[in-house]
Image (spheres, helix red, strand yellow):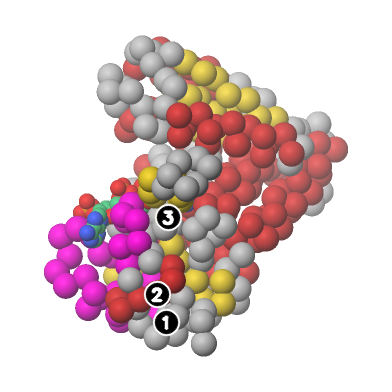
Amino acid sequence: MPAEIIDGAAVATKVRAEVAIAAAALAKHGIVPGLTVVLVGEDPGSMVYVASKEKACLEAGMHGETIRLPASTSQAELLAVVDRLNADPAIHGILVQMPLPKQIDSQTVIRRIAPQKDVDGFHPVNVGKVLIGDRDGFAPCTPWGVQVLLEAYGVKTTGMECVIVGRSNIVGKPMASLMVQPGAHADCTVTICHSRTRDLASHTKRADLLIAAIGRAEFVTGDMIRPGAVVIDVGMNRVDDATAKAGYRLKGDVHFESAKQVASLITPVPGGVGRMTIAMLLKNTVRAAEMTAPAIRAGA
Ligand code: NDP
Protein backbone atom coordinates (compact mmCIF):
# COMPACT_ATOMS: atom_id res chain seq x y z
CA MET A 1 0.00 0.00 0.00
CA PRO A 2 1.47 3.42 -0.90
CA ALA A 3 2.51 5.66 1.95
CA GLU A 4 0.25 8.20 3.60
CA ILE A 5 1.36 11.66 2.51
CA ILE A 6 2.06 14.25 5.18
CA ASP A 7 0.25 17.53 4.55
CA GLY A 8 2.83 20.08 5.66
CA ALA A 9 0.67 22.98 4.51
CA ALA A 10 -2.18 21.95 6.80
CA VAL A 11 0.08 21.52 9.84
CA ALA A 12 1.83 24.82 9.12
CA THR A 13 -1.54 26.59 8.88
CA LYS A 14 -2.47 25.21 12.30
CA VAL A 15 0.83 26.38 13.83
CA ARG A 16 0.37 29.83 12.31
CA ALA A 17 -3.15 30.03 13.74
CA GLU A 18 -1.75 29.18 17.20
CA VAL A 19 0.89 31.87 16.74
CA ALA A 20 -1.78 34.43 15.82
CA ILE A 21 -3.68 33.60 19.04
CA ALA A 22 -0.51 33.97 21.12
CA ALA A 23 0.33 37.25 19.35
CA ALA A 24 -3.18 38.58 20.07
CA ALA A 25 -2.78 37.67 23.76
CA LEU A 26 0.49 39.60 23.89
CA ALA A 27 -1.05 42.56 22.07
CA LYS A 28 -3.61 42.90 24.88
CA HIS A 29 -0.64 43.64 27.13
CA GLY A 30 0.79 46.14 24.66
CA ILE A 31 3.41 43.80 23.23
CA VAL A 32 3.52 43.24 19.49
CA PRO A 33 5.98 40.44 18.70
CA GLY A 34 8.50 41.85 16.23
CA LEU A 35 10.80 40.10 13.79
CA THR A 36 13.46 41.92 11.81
CA VAL A 37 15.08 40.19 8.89
CA VAL A 38 18.34 41.62 7.62
CA LEU A 39 19.07 40.97 3.96
CA VAL A 40 22.46 41.83 2.54
CA GLY A 41 22.66 41.89 -1.26
CA GLU A 42 20.16 40.75 -3.85
CA ASP A 43 20.35 36.97 -3.97
CA PRO A 44 17.08 36.13 -5.80
CA GLY A 45 16.26 33.08 -3.61
CA SER A 46 16.88 35.07 -0.41
CA MET A 47 14.71 37.95 -1.63
CA VAL A 48 11.78 35.55 -2.09
CA TYR A 49 12.28 33.97 1.37
CA VAL A 50 12.56 37.34 3.07
CA ALA A 51 9.38 38.68 1.46
CA SER A 52 7.43 35.61 2.55
CA LYS A 53 8.73 35.89 6.13
CA GLU A 54 7.63 39.52 6.36
CA LYS A 55 4.18 38.69 4.91
CA ALA A 56 3.74 35.74 7.31
CA CYS A 57 4.53 38.00 10.30
CA LEU A 58 1.93 40.55 9.29
CA GLU A 59 -0.69 37.84 8.71
CA ALA A 60 -0.11 36.55 12.24
CA GLY A 61 -0.65 40.02 13.73
CA MET A 62 3.06 40.50 14.37
CA HIS A 63 5.43 43.26 13.40
CA GLY A 64 7.64 42.17 10.52
CA GLU A 65 10.23 44.30 8.78
CA THR A 66 13.16 43.78 6.49
CA ILE A 67 16.33 45.82 6.52
CA ARG A 68 17.86 45.68 3.05
CA LEU A 69 21.57 46.43 2.82
CA PRO A 70 23.73 46.62 -0.32
CA ALA A 71 25.96 43.68 -1.28
CA SER A 72 28.98 45.94 -0.59
CA THR A 73 28.08 46.23 3.14
CA SER A 74 31.12 45.66 5.35
CA GLN A 75 31.13 43.28 8.29
CA ALA A 76 31.47 46.22 10.70
CA GLU A 77 28.41 47.92 9.17
CA LEU A 78 26.34 44.74 9.47
CA LEU A 79 27.46 44.19 13.06
CA ALA A 80 26.42 47.77 13.88
CA VAL A 81 22.92 47.01 12.55
CA VAL A 82 22.77 43.83 14.67
CA ASP A 83 23.90 45.82 17.74
CA ARG A 84 21.13 48.35 17.17
CA LEU A 85 18.49 45.60 16.85
CA ASN A 86 19.84 43.84 19.94
CA ALA A 87 19.25 47.04 21.90
CA ASP A 88 15.75 47.73 20.50
CA PRO A 89 13.06 46.46 22.91
CA ALA A 90 10.41 46.45 20.13
CA ILE A 91 12.37 43.78 18.24
CA HIS A 92 12.04 40.29 19.72
CA GLY A 93 13.56 38.26 16.89
CA ILE A 94 16.50 38.97 14.58
CA LEU A 95 17.30 36.91 11.54
CA VAL A 96 20.23 37.64 9.25
CA GLN A 97 19.46 35.96 5.95
CA MET A 98 22.17 33.59 4.71
CA PRO A 99 24.21 33.35 2.56
CA LEU A 100 26.13 36.55 3.22
CA PRO A 101 28.54 38.22 0.77
CA LYS A 102 32.14 36.97 0.86
CA GLN A 103 33.55 39.90 2.87
CA ILE A 104 31.36 38.96 5.87
CA ASP A 105 32.01 36.03 8.19
CA SER A 106 28.62 34.47 8.92
CA GLN A 107 29.73 32.90 12.23
CA THR A 108 30.86 36.29 13.54
CA VAL A 109 27.46 37.74 12.68
CA ILE A 110 25.52 34.82 14.18
CA ARG A 111 27.49 35.14 17.43
CA ARG A 112 26.74 38.87 17.61
CA ILE A 113 22.94 38.35 17.71
CA ALA A 114 21.68 38.38 21.30
CA PRO A 115 20.86 34.70 22.09
CA GLN A 116 17.43 35.71 23.43
CA LYS A 117 16.61 37.25 20.01
CA ASP A 118 18.21 34.48 17.92
CA VAL A 119 14.96 33.03 16.57
CA ASP A 120 16.87 31.10 13.87
CA GLY A 121 18.48 29.08 16.68
CA PHE A 122 22.00 29.26 15.23
CA HIS A 123 23.82 31.09 18.06
CA PRO A 124 26.15 28.72 19.96
CA VAL A 125 24.18 29.40 23.16
CA ASN A 126 20.99 28.10 21.55
CA VAL A 127 22.79 25.24 19.81
CA GLY A 128 24.07 24.20 23.24
CA LYS A 129 20.71 24.62 24.94
CA VAL A 130 19.00 22.44 22.35
CA LEU A 131 21.71 19.80 22.74
CA ILE A 132 21.34 19.66 26.52
CA GLY A 133 17.54 19.71 26.27
CA ASP A 134 17.07 23.16 27.83
CA ARG A 135 13.59 24.23 26.68
CA ASP A 136 14.41 27.92 26.97
CA GLY A 137 16.64 27.61 23.92
CA PHE A 138 15.48 28.32 20.37
CA ALA A 139 15.56 25.24 18.15
CA PRO A 140 16.36 25.87 14.48
CA CYS A 141 13.12 26.22 12.55
CA THR A 142 13.45 23.47 9.95
CA PRO A 143 14.37 20.57 12.27
CA TRP A 144 11.83 21.74 14.84
CA GLY A 145 9.24 21.84 12.07
CA VAL A 146 10.06 18.22 11.23
CA GLN A 147 9.50 17.24 14.84
CA VAL A 148 6.14 19.06 14.88
CA LEU A 149 5.09 17.22 11.71
CA LEU A 150 5.92 13.89 13.35
CA GLU A 151 3.89 14.91 16.39
CA ALA A 152 0.95 16.03 14.23
CA TYR A 153 0.84 12.62 12.54
CA GLY A 154 1.13 10.71 15.80
CA VAL A 155 4.44 9.05 14.93
CA LYS A 156 5.60 7.09 17.97
CA THR A 157 9.28 7.91 17.78
CA THR A 158 10.33 6.30 21.07
CA GLY A 159 12.99 3.69 20.41
CA MET A 160 13.01 4.30 16.66
CA GLU A 161 16.17 3.99 14.61
CA CYS A 162 16.39 7.52 13.21
CA VAL A 163 18.86 7.94 10.36
CA ILE A 164 19.61 11.49 9.24
CA VAL A 165 21.46 12.02 5.98
CA GLY A 166 23.25 15.37 6.17
CA ARG A 167 25.30 16.96 8.96
CA SER A 168 24.86 20.70 8.38
CA ASN A 169 24.56 23.07 11.32
CA ILE A 170 21.21 24.22 9.93
CA VAL A 171 19.46 20.90 9.52
CA GLY A 172 21.32 17.61 10.10
CA LYS A 173 23.08 18.26 13.42
CA PRO A 174 20.21 20.10 15.17
CA MET A 175 17.79 17.45 13.86
CA ALA A 176 19.92 14.85 15.63
CA SER A 177 19.99 16.99 18.80
CA LEU A 178 16.20 17.08 18.87
CA MET A 179 15.54 13.43 18.09
CA VAL A 180 18.04 12.06 20.61
CA GLN A 181 16.52 13.96 23.57
CA PRO A 182 14.57 12.03 26.14
CA GLY A 183 10.83 12.62 25.96
CA ALA A 184 7.89 12.79 23.62
CA HIS A 185 8.42 13.01 19.86
CA ALA A 186 12.09 12.11 20.34
CA ASP A 187 13.80 9.27 22.26
CA CYS A 188 15.32 7.91 19.05
CA THR A 189 18.54 6.03 18.44
CA VAL A 190 20.16 8.48 16.05
CA THR A 191 22.67 7.94 13.26
CA ILE A 192 24.01 10.88 11.25
CA CYS A 193 25.32 10.13 7.75
CA HIS A 194 27.26 12.42 5.40
CA SER A 195 29.31 12.37 2.24
CA ARG A 196 32.08 10.31 3.90
CA THR A 197 29.73 7.65 5.22
CA ARG A 198 30.61 4.16 3.98
CA ASP A 199 27.78 2.17 2.37
CA LEU A 200 25.08 4.78 2.93
CA ALA A 201 22.25 2.43 1.94
CA SER A 202 23.18 -0.01 4.72
CA HIS A 203 22.33 2.79 7.18
CA THR A 204 19.24 4.18 5.45
CA LYS A 205 17.77 0.67 5.15
CA ARG A 206 17.93 0.29 8.94
CA ALA A 207 15.90 3.45 9.53
CA ASP A 208 12.43 3.42 11.03
CA LEU A 209 12.61 7.18 10.58
CA LEU A 210 14.68 8.43 7.65
CA ILE A 211 15.36 12.16 7.37
CA ALA A 212 17.07 13.38 4.19
CA ALA A 213 18.81 16.78 4.24
CA ILE A 214 21.39 16.41 1.51
CA GLY A 215 20.79 19.00 -1.20
CA ARG A 216 20.79 16.50 -4.07
CA ALA A 217 17.61 16.01 -6.03
CA GLU A 218 15.97 12.55 -5.71
CA PHE A 219 19.12 11.06 -4.21
CA VAL A 220 17.38 8.62 -1.84
CA THR A 221 15.52 6.00 -3.83
CA GLY A 222 12.92 3.44 -2.77
CA ASP A 223 15.46 0.61 -2.65
CA MET A 224 17.37 2.50 0.08
CA ILE A 225 14.32 2.58 2.36
CA ARG A 226 13.11 0.01 4.85
CA PRO A 227 9.52 -1.13 4.17
CA GLY A 228 7.15 0.78 6.46
CA ALA A 229 9.62 3.53 7.33
CA VAL A 230 8.61 7.13 7.96
CA VAL A 231 10.43 9.29 5.41
CA ILE A 232 10.98 13.01 5.88
CA ASP A 233 12.39 14.92 2.94
CA VAL A 234 13.95 18.25 3.87
CA GLY A 235 15.54 18.79 0.45
CA MET A 236 14.59 21.70 -1.77
CA ASN A 237 16.36 21.48 -5.09
CA ARG A 238 15.55 23.50 -8.18
CA VAL A 239 15.69 21.21 -11.21
CA ASP A 240 15.51 22.80 -14.68
CA ASP A 241 12.28 21.98 -16.47
CA ALA A 242 11.31 23.88 -19.61
CA THR A 243 7.70 22.69 -19.27
CA ALA A 244 7.33 24.36 -15.85
CA LYS A 245 6.09 27.98 -15.73
CA ALA A 246 9.06 29.04 -13.60
CA GLY A 247 11.52 27.14 -15.80
CA TYR A 248 12.31 24.75 -12.94
CA ARG A 249 10.60 22.35 -10.56
CA LEU A 250 11.23 21.92 -6.86
CA LYS A 251 12.46 18.42 -6.05
CA GLY A 252 13.28 16.87 -2.73
CA ASP A 253 16.29 14.78 -1.78
CA VAL A 254 14.06 11.69 -1.92
CA HIS A 255 12.80 10.07 -5.12
CA PHE A 256 9.17 10.47 -4.16
CA GLU A 257 7.56 8.01 -6.58
CA SER A 258 9.72 5.02 -5.62
CA ALA A 259 9.89 5.97 -1.92
CA LYS A 260 6.15 6.24 -1.45
CA GLN A 261 5.74 2.62 -2.58
CA VAL A 262 7.90 1.47 0.35
CA ALA A 263 7.37 4.00 3.14
CA SER A 264 4.37 4.14 5.48
CA LEU A 265 4.38 7.94 5.81
CA ILE A 266 6.20 10.47 3.66
CA THR A 267 6.54 14.22 3.13
CA PRO A 268 6.13 15.59 -0.40
CA VAL A 269 8.21 18.39 -1.93
CA PRO A 270 6.77 20.95 -2.18
CA GLY A 271 4.06 20.90 0.49
CA GLY A 272 5.98 19.11 3.23
CA VAL A 273 8.77 20.35 5.48
CA GLY A 274 9.24 23.63 3.59
CA ARG A 275 5.89 24.93 4.76
CA MET A 276 6.88 24.39 8.39
CA THR A 277 10.04 26.49 8.46
CA ILE A 278 8.39 29.91 8.41
CA ALA A 279 5.64 28.72 10.79
CA MET A 280 8.27 27.72 13.36
CA LEU A 281 10.12 31.02 12.83
CA LEU A 282 6.93 32.85 13.80
CA LYS A 283 6.52 30.55 16.78
CA ASN A 284 10.07 31.24 17.95
CA THR A 285 9.48 35.00 17.60
CA VAL A 286 6.32 34.83 19.71
CA ARG A 287 8.21 32.76 22.29
CA ALA A 288 10.98 35.40 22.33
CA ALA A 289 8.36 38.10 22.96
CA GLU A 290 6.70 36.01 25.69
CA MET A 291 10.07 35.58 27.38
CA THR A 292 10.31 39.35 27.78
CA ALA A 293 7.03 39.23 29.73
CA PRO A 294 7.11 36.12 31.94
CA ALA A 295 3.88 37.08 33.74
CA ILE A 296 1.91 37.00 30.48
CA ARG A 297 3.53 33.72 29.50
CA ALA A 298 2.29 32.18 32.73
CA GLY A 299 -1.21 33.39 31.89
CA ALA A 300 -1.29 36.12 34.53
P1 NDP B 1 24.34 21.41 3.22
O1 NDP B 1 24.87 21.47 1.83
O2 NDP B 1 24.85 22.39 4.21
O3 NDP B 1 24.57 19.95 3.80
C1 NDP B 1 24.32 18.82 3.03
C2 NDP B 1 24.74 17.60 3.79
O4 NDP B 1 24.51 16.46 2.96
C3 NDP B 1 26.22 17.61 4.15
O5 NDP B 1 26.38 17.17 5.49
C4 NDP B 1 26.84 16.62 3.19
O6 NDP B 1 27.92 15.88 3.71
C5 NDP B 1 25.67 15.66 2.96
N1 NDP B 1 25.83 14.99 1.66
C6 NDP B 1 26.08 15.56 0.46
N2 NDP B 1 26.22 14.61 -0.49
C7 NDP B 1 26.08 13.43 0.14
C8 NDP B 1 26.15 12.09 -0.28
N3 NDP B 1 26.41 11.76 -1.56
N4 NDP B 1 25.95 11.11 0.62
C9 NDP B 1 25.72 11.42 1.91
N5 NDP B 1 25.64 12.67 2.39
C10 NDP B 1 25.83 13.68 1.51
O7 NDP B 1 22.75 21.52 3.07
P2 NDP B 1 21.63 21.93 4.15
O8 NDP B 1 21.68 21.03 5.32
O9 NDP B 1 21.64 23.39 4.35
O10 NDP B 1 20.33 21.60 3.30
C11 NDP B 1 20.03 20.28 2.88
C12 NDP B 1 18.82 20.33 1.98
O11 NDP B 1 17.72 20.83 2.71
C13 NDP B 1 18.96 21.26 0.78
O12 NDP B 1 18.22 20.71 -0.31
C14 NDP B 1 18.31 22.54 1.22
O13 NDP B 1 17.80 23.31 0.16
C15 NDP B 1 17.19 21.98 2.06
N6 NDP B 1 16.71 22.89 3.11
C16 NDP B 1 15.37 23.02 3.20
C17 NDP B 1 14.84 23.84 4.16
C18 NDP B 1 13.38 23.92 4.27
O14 NDP B 1 12.85 24.90 4.77
N7 NDP B 1 12.66 22.89 3.82
C19 NDP B 1 15.68 24.63 5.06
C20 NDP B 1 17.10 24.34 4.94
C21 NDP B 1 17.58 23.51 3.96
P3 NDP B 1 29.34 16.60 4.07
O15 NDP B 1 29.10 17.32 5.37
O16 NDP B 1 30.27 15.47 4.19
O17 NDP B 1 29.64 17.54 2.94
Mark 3 residue type: Lys
Q: Which mark is residue 208?
A: none
Residue most extreme to the right: 28
Q: Secondary structure at mark 3?
A: strand
Q: What main secondary structure does the magenta stretch of the protein show?
A: loop
- Asked if 41 appears above or below 259 in the picture, the reply is above
Q: Is residue 99 above or below residue 174?
A: above
Q: Quadrant of residue 254?
A: bottom left
Q: Position of residue 222 (x, y in %)?
A: 35, 76
Name the residue type under label 2.
Ser
Residues at marks 2 and 1 touching, judged by CB atoms closer than 8 Å: yes
Q: Does the residue at mark 2 contact the one at mark 3 (Cβ under 8 Å)?
A: no
Q: What is the magenta range?
A: 192-220
Residue annotated with mark 1: 262
**Residue 66 image position (x, y, % from top left):** 58, 24
Which label was assigned to residue 251?
Answer: 3
In primary-sequence order, the first of circles 1 and 3 is: 3
49 part of magenta stretch: no
Question: What whole-number distance in Å separates the C-alpha atoms at marks 1 and 3?
Answer: 19 Å
Residue at coordinates 72% horizontally, 34% vertically from top-left?
Answer: 58
Q: Position of residue 208 (x, y in %)?
A: 40, 80
- C-alpha span from label 2 to label 1: 7 Å
